[in-house]
Image: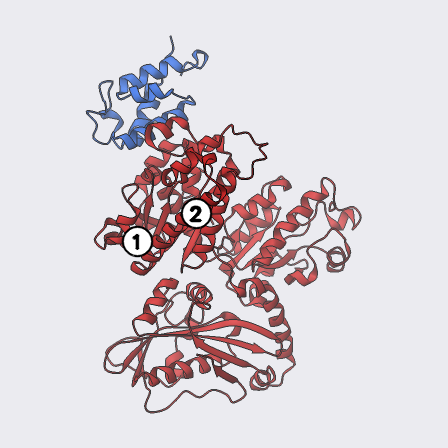
Chain colours: A blue, B red
Amino acid sequence: MKQVDIERLYSVISDVLNIPSESISEESSSDTIDSWSSLTHINLIVSIESEFNVQFSVEDTIDMLSVKLIRMILEDILPSRLSL
Amino acid sequence: MIKDVAYSSNESPADYARISREINNSDYLRDVSVAFLSSYTMEILKPYIHVELAKRGLFSSTYFAPYNNLEQEINNNNSGLHSFNPDVVVIHNRIEDINLEVLTRFYSYSVDELENEVESIILRFRDILETLRKKSNALIIIINFAYTQDQVGNFVGSQLSHSISMYIQNINNQLWKLCSEITSCYVINYQQLLLEYGLHNWIDSRLYFLGRIPFSGNAQIKMGKALARTISATCVAPCKCLVLDLDNTLWGGVLGEDGISGIQLGDDYPGNVYKSFQRTILSLRDQGILLAIASKNNISDAMEVIEKHTSCLIKKKHLSSIQINWNDKATNIHVIAKELNIGIDTIAFFDDNPVEREWVKKQIPEVKVIDVPKNPILYSWALLGSELFDKVSLTREDKNRADIYNQEKKRNEFHVKSKSVDNFLEGLEMSVTLGFVGDITLSRVEQLVNKTNQFNLTCIRHTAENIKMIINSGGVAIWMSVKDKFGDSGVVGIAIAKKMKDGQWLIDTFLLSCRVIGRKLDLVLLNYICKIVKGKGGSELYGEYIATPRNGLVCDFFVEHGFDRVVNKSNYWSYNLKAGSIKYPDFIRSEFVG
């Protein structure tokens, strides 16, 4: 089972969207976080890709509008041996 | 030089977002406001630009206009752009956003039709830039056109008479010409930037189709750096002098041990690495950077290499000061600064030895010590990447600067031989020319106004556009150039005066280049500015001395030249233009060319 380093993920989201890590949960989404706009969404994609050294597909980047979805998509594409 | 601002140099995009919010105004030297007009969502670059400018000592506030609103923003006096009143306007129109039809059906156009397209694009830009120039004093930076992602995978062996790449190059050439006609307007060579990183790495098709973003994540950082580097170059003065070591810097090996035939300098590896580095250094000299040597060596051995080694491209004639001895390098750098009469903080130091670099850093913190990589192949990148010599424009004085300093050396030798100061000055056979600041002199005047620190009464900095505005609103701006028997020093003095009311005028700027201090030329300049102001109906000329850490030299300027102290106002002085005129020595010939 691949696992995403949740702390690292939350830290990136916190940096990009300018919200405290503690306020982030699986349920956080572009609907609940004001600073999550179409522009910061691009920043978020680029930042997560850089942090975890991965590349999302176009469909994934359109879909990942909540923290839970980001986590699931990341789990899906992270190489298993790295077990991040 | 780029400061590390206490952050690592390999920030991730998330780091940029965080650091961008943490940057605090009070930590930095200068504020700069930048407006962006673009054909795509340029705001994506905001954190990168903000952080990269901060690394260069600039605290930025930014305005991003809604995309594709160029004409509206520029023409409408109440637009966001004009209310923001920026110091710098950056314009980025991508070719695929403004000229998509042609790119899509390129081969359905005839050569003539394509030429018409180029013309209409340039006409549009001429209109935009001229209107903006009329309405704003801001510096204009325009980003040129680059290949689009559709060029990836193109067949490169095509023998067709015209191609998209030629078309884009043609627009860029015309754009360049256009910008050179507009005051304070500079081009960022975006096409070159893409070439450096590769179109493949630069674009990210996902972001392109998702959000009209023409950059990959990495390219966004690179773009932020390129923009910050250019903006910084427009407002931070470059270093004047590069001080170089010899052993393992200009050639490989140690001369004292290996001898002239043993050092590495030639046309094969590893000697060609050093020869190529010498070429880079000489190209800096061609742009007006003075070269000097500070080396611990036996002077006769070292000069033999410099003068006689066929692969040593840097010769004695290229060097403005040579300090080859066993003194410590900090002492030698002080000697160089004194000999060339330049500020110690305008000197950059390049030495392969980390111990020497540390020593100089500790002894003279003002000297810009370049971080030199161990591998000499990387020397040129380290030198140019230090950004210490970045210049957005080259003036006639820049191109001749090194020769001008050589004349100065001869002048000094003559000085030593002369009996008295007046005897020396008379023997120089100085001839001064003055005139009103106009289009031809404006870029040199702007340069002097922004970098002169010592003989500068107010140290008020102006853009070229500011100066034009002062002139257009009835003020007076004059330049002064000087020739003597040793050569032409070019434009070396500026005086600007503003009209206040009832015949009262105020000296806004009065400065002399450090090269000509002590030659009584300030008297000539003062004489003329008084005469001209008087001719325009002025009766009283006011002057202010604004103290800075560097202009203590002129703190008594006004009292020494017969100005009266203005009561109740510190550092304000006045001169009654009706009562008399400023005298200067007869042996200085002068001419006002209008």
Q: Which mark is residue B216?
A: none
Q: Residue at label 2? A: B116
CB within 8 Å, label 1 to label 2: no
Q: Would residue B56 be seen by someone viewing this image from the given angle?
A: no
Identified at 34% across, 19% down, the residue is A59
Q: Residues within 10 Å of mark 1 (few under 14, many from 20)?
A: many
Q: Residue at label 1? A: B86
Residue lying at the far left in this picture: please name it.
A32
Q: Nearer the viewer, residue B14 or B531?
A: B531
Tag 2: amino acid: Asn
Horizontal and vertical percent position of residue B293? 64, 57
Question: Can you tell which quarter of the image residue B473 is in?
Answer: bottom left
Q: Is residue B233 left or right of residue B252?
A: left
Question: Can you tell which quarter of the image residue B435 is in?
Answer: bottom left
- Element type where label 2 sits in the image: helix
Q: Nearer the viewer, residue B497 or B305?
A: B497
Residues at marks 1 and 2, CA–CA distance in whole angstroms? 34 Å
Q: Is residue B302 left or right of residue B498?
A: right
Question: Can you tell which quarter of the image residue B548 is in?
Answer: bottom left
In this rendering, is residue B107 above or below B580? above
Horizontal and vertical percent position of residue A76? 37, 13
- Element type where label 1 sits in the image: loop
Residue lying at the far bottom in this picture: please name it.
B579
Horizontal and vertical percent position of residue B459? 38, 67
